[in-house]
Image: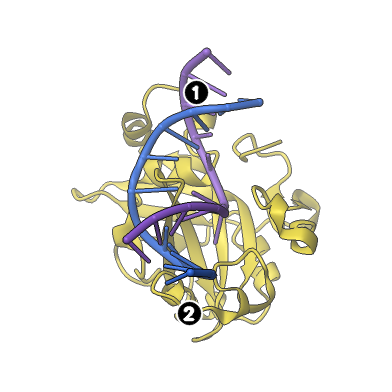
Chain colours: A yellow, B blue, C purple
Amino acid sequence: MNKLPREFYTREDTLQIAQDLLGKTLVIPTKSGERVSGMIVETEAYLGAIDKVAHSYQSRRTKRTETMFAVGGTIYIFFIYGMYFQFNVVIGKMDVPHAVLIRAVEPLENIEIMRQRRGEMPDKNLTSGPGKLCIALGIDKTFNNEDLLGNRVWLENEKTFSVEEIASGRRIGIDYAEEFAEKPWRFWVKDSLFVSRK
DNA sequence: CAAGTGATTAGC
DNA sequence: CTAATCACTTGC
């Protein structure tokens, strides 16, 4: 096991970290200790204070966004559209409300468990979206405020992709956000079959 | 392409 | 208190 250290998450450059997260493995053991894991292939950066789309825009501090102000390496989970959870990694030092949304992973270990939770479908649909991967990996709101250096969920340093292997583009589902909707703050692995949109 | 779903938030 | 909104998914 090769857990990413605190320093990985507390660096200044959130956009760089969003790219560095590609290729890392998200591991969430079941109650009986089986490793359910997937490699991150798609992320989006949310730059807190200045980013109109971020829940923490203008450093808005509410009951929900409180977690985004925690130290880097904390997990921020929120519930959306009455049905889905979204899994975010808090970035930066304490009180810097930046986060990276994990949008897609490639299933690695115990794929049968993910199939059970998601229902029968092609493997490439199992975790190719932020709501889907939460179901497949068993993430719910009790993971909010968990620490990635703890034992409930963590990231391992599987591999690092080079700039040539990474593509970027505008973020999904935020067309209302005027100039911030255009920012190329979504990153994915170019030839992965498991990203949410081609 | 549209509906479904309920927490969260801003605005009275 | 009420109403509008929403970093999505699925099945027409």
Three-letter code, disc 2: Arg
Residue A114 versus residue A6 in the image, above or below: above
Counting residues from the start of the chain, the first of labels 2 and 1 encountered is 2
Is B8 left, or right, of A182 in this rendering? Answer: left
- Say left or right for A164 vs A156: right
Tell me the residue at 50%/66% (across/down): A89
Instruction: Identify residue for label 1.
Output: A122
Q: Is residue A151 visible?
A: yes
Q: Give the vertical position of A32 relative to A44 (above or below).
A: above
Subunit bearing disc 1: A
Name the quarter where the C terminus of chain A is drawn: top right
- Mark 2, Cα crowd under 10 Å, few <14 / some 14-19 / many 20+, is some
Q: Residue furthest bottom?
A: A94
**Viewer-proximal residue, A126 or A30?**
A126
**Residue for point 52% across, 62% down:** A157
Report if residue A2 is visible in the image.
no
**Residue A11 percent location from the top left of the image:** 61, 81
Q: Quadrant of residue A84?
A: top left
Residue A161: x and y, percent?
69, 55
Q: Nearer the viewer, mark 2 or mark 1?
A: 2
Q: Are marks 2 and 1 on the same chain?
A: yes
Q: Position of residue A170 (x, y in %)?
A: 75, 52
Q: Quadrant of the N terminus of chain A?
A: bottom left
Element assignment for label 1:
loop
Q: Is disc 1 surrounded by few (<14), some (14 to 19) or many (20+) residues within 10 Å?
A: few
Residue at mark 2 to residue at mark 1: CA–CA distance: 40 Å
Question: Which residue is labeled 2 in the image?
Answer: A61
Give the number of callouts: 2
Chain to which mark 2 belongs = A
